[in-house]
Image: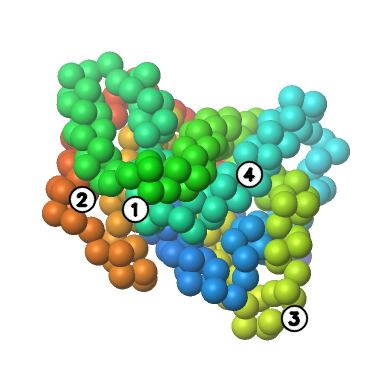
Amino acid sequence: MVESLFHSPRRAAARIVQRMPPHVYFVVSAVFHYLGPALAVLLFARVEVLGVAWLRIATAAVVFAVWRRPWRLWPRLDRATRWLLTGWAAVLAVMNSVFYLAIDRLPLGTVAAIEFLPVIVLAAVAARTRRNVVALVAAVAGVYLLTDVRLVAEPLGIAFAAANAVLFALYIVLGHRVARSRQVSGIDGLALSMMIAAVIALPIGIGQAAPAFLDPVALAAAAGVGICSSVIPYVSDQLAMARLPRATYALMVSLLPATATVVGIIVLTQVPAVAEVIGVVLVVAGVALHQERETERAEPPDPT
């Protein structure tokens, strides 16, 4: 009886999660995907870039550890799933680090546009209708206008942004595999991977993160960045990925440069030019035009 009462709230929550349209989770992810980094840019004045990146990962790992206690699942996983989660953890650790190095040198909207370019290839692979092709062309044109890149001015920033773009595409591919895994739920897989990522990123960022442990304000701000950047959006990603085909999700990611531009205006006062505004409109049009095929719809597993 007591056990039944204990599990009832979780089952009720699971039902609510399942009934929520997957696109809602994507919108939440899109907002927090760049709100957290925008706050991180403001934090760079108190903590070095790689230190903020590690604190972001470590905070998320602590939250997931308390919430899901994922280490209990590790002994039950087969070798293939363990390698999948470890690979995803490595991607998370390096991707977050190079992303912060990029936004330290380039506007948030520019990094987001570069981040999007490899992702559109994932959508292009599965675009089998004329309408989807038009949607892809509109989205790519929008990203082109959003990408106001001057390679000579900031070559290192471009290199970091390009590396982040490749890793972000890998994040989506591996994230979908975790979301559809029969061995572990998407959120528990994310929790395990985030804990491993904190260990992998430790040598990269702990040196620069150390001073924050003597600065309570910086430490609290870094924890907030971690929750906004790596808990809310990544959990939302898993809930969306579990119920959206990879091609649909990949095209919806084209909203991220637009989201980053808006967040950049509000938080960092990075006001876009007219061409960039047109780019935002084209990206949104591409997402609106895209039509999910009935044959691509997947039966969602339980994401909780």
The amino acid type found where label 3 is placed reads Leu
Query: Where does label 4 land, which residue?
Result: 94
Residue 192 lies left or right of residue 160; in this view the side is right
Query: Which tag, 1 or 4, sits closer to the chain's start?
Result: 4
Query: Which tag, 4 or 3, sits closer to the chain's start?
Result: 4
Q: Are marks 3 and 1 in contact (CB under 8 Å)?
A: no
As helix, strand or loop, the secondary structure at mark 1 comes to helix
Q: Residue furthest front?
A: 152
* Mark 2 surroundings: few (<14), some (14-19) or many (≥20) residues within 10 A: many
Instruction: Note whether residue 201 is visible.
Output: yes
The amino acid type found where label 4 is placed reads Val
* Mark 3 surroundings: few (<14), some (14-19) or many (≥20) residues within 10 A: few
Query: Which tag, 3 or 2, sits closer to the chain's start?
Result: 3
Q: For the point 23% across and 25% down, which residue is it? A: 132
As helix, strand or loop, the secondary structure at mark 2 comes to helix
Residue 156 location (% of width, % of height)? 50, 45
Mark number displayed over residue 109: 1
Q: Is residue 246 above or below residue 97?
A: above
- Alpha carbon of mark 1 to alpha carbon of mark 4: how far? 20 Å
Residue 40 location (% of width, % of height)? 52, 66
The amino acid type found where label 1 is placed reads Gly
The amino acid type found where label 2 is placed reads Glu
* Mark 4 surroundings: few (<14), some (14-19) or many (≥20) residues within 10 A: some
- Alpha carbon of mark 4 to alpha carbon of mark 2: how far? 29 Å
Residue 138 lies left or right of residue 125; in this view the side is left
Q: Nearer the viewer, residue 14 or 32?
A: 32
Q: For the point 62% across and 31% down, which residue is it? A: 181
As helix, strand or loop, the secondary structure at mark 3 comes to helix
- State the image quarter where residue 34 is shown: bottom left
Residue 263 location (% of width, % of height)? 34, 63
